[in-house]
Image (cartoon, rainbow, N blue to C red):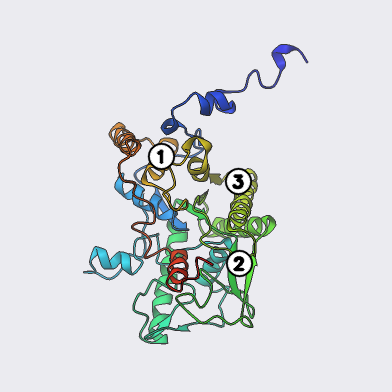
Amino acid sequence: MSAKNRPYDSAPPHAWWRRAIADISASNINPALRGDFEITSETRIATAGSCFAQELSKATAERGYKNYVVEKGPPGLSEENRLKFGYGLFSARYGNIYTTRQLVQLLDRAYGRFDSTETAWPGKTGYVDPFRPFVQPEDFISESELLADREQHLECVREMFENMDVFVFTLGLTEGWRARSDGATYPLCPGYGAGTFNPEKYEFFNMRVNEVVADLEYVRERLSELNRNARILLTVSPVPLVATATGKHVLEATAYSKSVLKVAAAEVTAAHPSVSYFPSYEIITGTFSTDRYYSQDRRSVTQEGISHVMRCFFSTYSETPESLRERDVAAVESDSRNEPRETINKDLSSICDEERLLEILESADLSKT
């Protein structure tokens, strides 16, 4: 092979660490490169997944893009109560969807392909939806009210899947809990804030790469039948596990979970042109961010990190107005001057299901064990 044909000689700047990372200001690093589709003001963007997905939902609305919300809540509900009751956090009122198995079952429940034997859990004052344990802060008054609300909710889910243009799903966890009887999967371990834990009824699972890939393939195939033109945009949440049930150190468990989700997303993206991946995880966890993108708990993402992710997202997939770009850069520079750092969990702790586990553990003084 002649010198002029050597493979790295013609590699673009983004392929070289020095040119793409070391020689560039941290706030200007964008590993997303060029988007393979465009988001316009008319694009209906649906969101689901972990708490981190809520940031994209807010950012699209703030920038004048179409945050596609199909379940908006009763008329006259105040904005505070709307958020308290889970309306507008995502496209529909399904709460956090941490695992791909939850997403599969949401899709199947919406179209009558899966119906769990556990329809409701007893709550403090009424009944709790096992699949949406915290969307009704005061509990449902009766099981019939819960089922009626669920039916209306699933109708909205069908509307979302059938009419959205882009489905942004943030993969959060590989660990989860399910019913031994029928495999029904929950967003949180029963007994922590909702339900009662019974090891004879519920079991822990930790998904492997092939399982996550199979779930994503199933979702892609079903969506192609329901909405031929819809695209799927996958991201991986950079927020570490709040706790692990594997018996391993939480740091190792987090690395495993995020690695599996990253590889699975890469496998599905490589196989299907209709599926894309946006590297929000890489932006937050990259070595260039040092300690700026996580708060003191080393888990919550700072506003500076969120601004970087959103700036990259809109510059990659849409025509970002220069005024918005300047505003985002100003926010980053403000943070870099050591002003107080707001975190992603500051405003979202009341509606991130996983945070409930932390609150319960801390109240019982178990988080220090």
Write the residue at 49% across / 37% down.
Answer: 35
- Residue 105 lies in quadrant: bottom right
**Residue highlighted by disc 3:** 269
**Residue highlighted by disc 1:** 308
Which type of secondary structure does the marked residue at label 3 adopt? helix
- Residue 347 lies in quadrant: bottom left
Mark 2 surroundings: few (<14), some (14-19) or many (≥20) residues within 10 A: some
**Residue highlighted by disc 2:** 245
Depth check, front residue: 68 or 260: 260
User: Of discs 1 and 3, which sits in the foreground?
Assistant: 1
- In what quadrant of the picture does the N terminus appear? top right
Which type of secondary structure does the marked residue at label 1 adopt? helix
User: Of discs 2 and 1, which sits in the foreground?
Assistant: 2
Query: Of the residues under marks 2 and 3, which one precedes in the sequence?
Result: 2
Write the residue at 34% across / 44% down.
Answer: 41
Write the residue at 46% across / 66% down.
Answer: 358
- Disc 2 + disc 1, Cβ < 8 Å: no
- Disc 2 + disc 3, Cβ < 8 Å: no
Q: Position of residue 203 (x, y in %)?
A: 63, 75
For residue 59, side relative to residue 96 (left or right): left
